Amino acid sequence: MDQNFRLSDGGLINRDKKLSFKFNNKNYYGYEGDTLASALIANGVHLIGRSFKYHRPRGFFGAGVDEPYAMVQLYRNGETEPNIKATEQELFEGLEATSVNCWPSVNFDIGAINNFLKIFLPAGFYYKTFMWPKSFWYKVYEPFIRKSAGLGVASIKHDKERYEHKYEYCDLLIAGSGPSGLASAYAAAKNGARVILAEDKARFGGTLLTSEVNIGNKSGKEWAEGIIAELKEMPNVTVKNRSQVFGYYDHNMLVMSERISDHLSKTKKFHPKQRLWYIRAKEVLISSGSIERPIVFGNNDTPGVMLSSAAKEYLKVYGVLVGRNPLIFTNNDSGYETAIEFKKNGVDPTILDTRKDPQSEIIDEAKNLGINIKFSYVVVAAQGYKKVKSADIAKISDDKEQLGSVENIKCDCICVSGFWTPTIHLASQSGNKTKFNEEIDAFVPGTSKQNETTLGAANGSYTLEETLKNSFETAYDLSKKITNNDNKISLPNVVEKKSTTHDKFWCVPLPNGKNYKRFVDFQNDVAVSDIEIALKEGYRSIEHVKRYTTLGMATDQGKTSNLNGLQLVSNIENKVVPNVGHTTFRPPYTPVSIGAIVGREVGKHSKPTRKSPMHKWHEQNNAIFVDAGVWLRPRYYKQGNENLFEASKREAKNVRTNVGVCDVTTLGKIDIKGPNAAELLNRVYTNAWLKLPVGKARYGVMLREDGIVMDDGTTTRISENHYHMTTTTAQAANVLSHLEYYLQLIWPELNVNVVSTTEQWAGAAVAGPKSRDLLQKLFPKSDVSNEGLPFMGYIEGDLFGVKARIFRISFSGELAYEVNVESDNGNFMWEKIMEVGEEFKIQPYGTEALSTLRIEMGHVAGSELDGRTIPYDNSLEGLLSKKKDFIGKRSLTRKAFIAEDRQKIVGVVPLDKKTSIPEGSHLVKDSNAPLPNPKLGYISASCWSVEHDNPFSLAILKNGKNMIGEKLFVMSPLKNKVIPVEIVSSHYVDPKGERVRS
Amino acid sequence: MLHIKCPHCGMRSQNEFSYGGDATVKRPELGKEISDQDWDNFVYNRKSLRGKHLELWQHLSGCRQWIKVERDTATHEIFRTLKANEDNS
């Protein structure tokens, strides 16, 4: 197809570079510098999609961020993205796009039947229709809504693109590069301030690109280009196009999304697709301009009805005609500018002006050009289904209530201008108390809460001279405050045409006997009648009206609809707009891709990965890893075709019979030093610590103030005032903060320092009946006999020239030791242990075997110390000192905690000694009891006992103390299992603890 | 994201800090008799204030010091920040 609606010259596109693209599987051409919208319009394509509710044909309404209709499903480099605005998507070679929200095709859409059944789809339709019967929701209503509503389709594939985050600080952040943005950036930059200038579009300059003005003897466009070129050269300035500042958050933090590669066929190597900027600015200048307001009339959603400023932009920037027989419908002078552009390009427009007899330079120019102007005229309704074919027009009375006789005139587009709405979103997001400006019928920023200033059209200032003057002055003042420089720019000479006041007219009355849909919110299909119904039904607050009708709730967030909605509510309610108030503006101003929000923190990169110094060895020895918090730990070491179950059983059994070695580097380690260290431990742990001798370790439990167990571990007295504390892997960071909290805030008089040494020490647990023999060979110079190094003893040793700490502590319940060396020597230690251990049949064991060993011993771990249990529940009440106070002690006397039938840890064995018990299952008395079956407890951890060769679990069971020997049922509805079990002691192996002391 | 002035390190972003609750709560002295009610008040009962609130934050990814921050819970305005041992009167 040829670009029939492209002018032979003009525009800012690169006509030397032709690009091919596909829309709904048809091939078209455009030029570099086009948007998908401008290229489609150049090809005469105006039917883009179907509307949300009624599936009415929809085309283009705007030329940028405010576009409510023209959203497409975009295909780029094998990826797809929904809801891309055709007016924002720049054209690239090979671009493919399809319509959204239509089925089977945009030309023939079955859902359009909704349009003819619209009587059934009034305001609040979702609330009214789908409420009953309740059982219909999942099977009938929801699938129906999902099919008929919704916009594009999200890709379910992994997004291969890269997204980045950047943190930046600046003196002035300037959002928008129109006249006020350029002027203020220039003035502040010249005054030495660090400036970031952000422009949403590809081209800088905003309205300067489309308006007939002269600044310092240059056209607006040339002036803008000059300023930008100069700013780009300045080291204190960052200039970013394709960058939308979409959110204004607390403490002058703004977030900007930069689209780096979306305009290219393919992201360049090592480039991100998008980058999210977190910008902390000392001052923010909001120069976001304004958006043209539609006038509401019948069928005002027909493709071909669009904003007059958009028509002008298509002409001046893209060299594209939106129609050859345009009708301009305006209540102010802006429509004339569009008409004049048409005329200059050889197209004869007709202007309908709602005003009776306006006088201004622009109007005179239009008259002089011989443009056909009809004053006191309105468009009653657009005619045509998939494209405007004609318009019903009529004269309107001076009070704007009565229509004259309706005539029909031919036209192929209707360009609407209902004056301008300042884009106050950022200001409002910052907490600015906006105020209503009667003169322009719109809200403008009022009292600032944060350091922001709004300039130019966004502030309701519509003359160029005033805008430039204010912008130069404001930027100079603010930058002077920050930099103390005094370099002022003088205002260039500005030539612009004077315009006159607009007509406060925004909605054309319905002619007698006609019932045209007059849309207020185009994307969500909210018509005048819907808002009327909402008010009739008693909704008063604008926030309620919004939610009931969905006015302003679509992806365009009411950029073109908010004020007309407010006007309508005010009219019906006989209130003035400022009394109705506007709904809250919330970030983001425009949709932001999830990828950009997530940034690089995807998959494995969502958190750091911690590896022990022995990680490589584990990898080389077939370790299968498991995530333990952010750590990677060997779960088991695979031999041959073993599965997890077989391998962990083998590893655990080898610990019970020979000797095993486990990487315990991940345990939290905290170095505690100071004359009051023992006192701190005595307050933090539940048991007594003042008399622990040097060279001894002790097991301790610490509580939260509410009596719940926080963590457990051993702490060793290394020397007089020096302790080495270990914590569980999961709680390491919390325990350190906990200690710091008490030392810094509660007991600052304690002279103690704490510091994490988790990363400084590599640890290996050597466990099993042959562990002492192995240890003796590893440390031939040390006395590791039961007398020389008794249970809970500590010595320092020499491991083939490497300094080592040896703790005789045991988690497996076997005779066991933990050897620590400085991290750099971790691998050396590990290899030596493996080498020397060979004759004792040593095997490494992973977390799965580790769990098995501790579970059958009845040692508690994270699954029991789960933030819900007190010491008694874990049979740790023997560790509660009666003689001293400690953190959380007072809570333990609370009623529930001393109840006779308080929950307690028990062991659970299936009666058939075969069926494994799923963790998380519930324990019940009667498996056939009616639901809800009273739950007596839950399975906290399960294993296959290698000692007894049958399944064994730990459970936290109500009245566990008196339940030993009881027969209960384990129920797992998730796994659909009911298992008869017997309750036994939680100490399933070596209940007297003889092995650890042997 | 808040911008918090650590009294030890200077202005830092909120993501370096962790929140630690009401800074005006006094822990009862160790070993002292205390009623259930008073203990409950210490452990559980907090006012959810709208407005000026003195609260604890820890500069977790910085100097690891616990600090006091006087903040408006509704507007997020931060009036001042104090070291742990500074009096908040």
Image (cartoon, coloured by chain):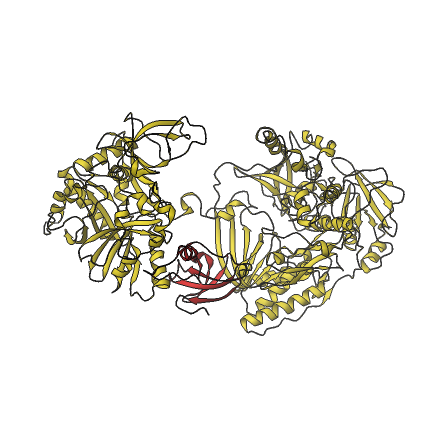
Chain colours: A yellow, B red
Q: Is residue A261 left or right of residue A956?
A: right
- Count of picture labels: 0
Query: In percent of the image, x 67 and y 67: which residue is there?
Result: A470
The residue lying at 70 percent from left, 60 percent from top is A460
Quadrant (top left/top right/bottom left/bottom right) for the C terminus of chain A = top left
Task: Name the side, left or right, on which A517 lies relative to A426.
Answer: right
Quadrant of the snapshot with the N terminus of chain A: top right
| Coordinates of residue A516 in the picture (x, y in percent) | 79, 38
Q: Where is residue A363 drawn, in percent x and y?
A: 82, 56
Depicted A556 relative to depicted A147: above or below: below
Q: Is residue A638 above or below residue A228?
A: above
Residue A173 visible from this viewpoint: yes
Residue A867, can we see it? no
Residue A658 position, x and y percent, is 16, 37
Q: Position of residue A985 (x, y in %)?
A: 26, 36
* Quadrant of residue A478 within the rendered picture: bottom right
Image quarter for residue A26? top right
Q: Is residue A527 left or right of residue A603?
A: right
Q: Nearer the viewer, residue A882 or A697?
A: A882
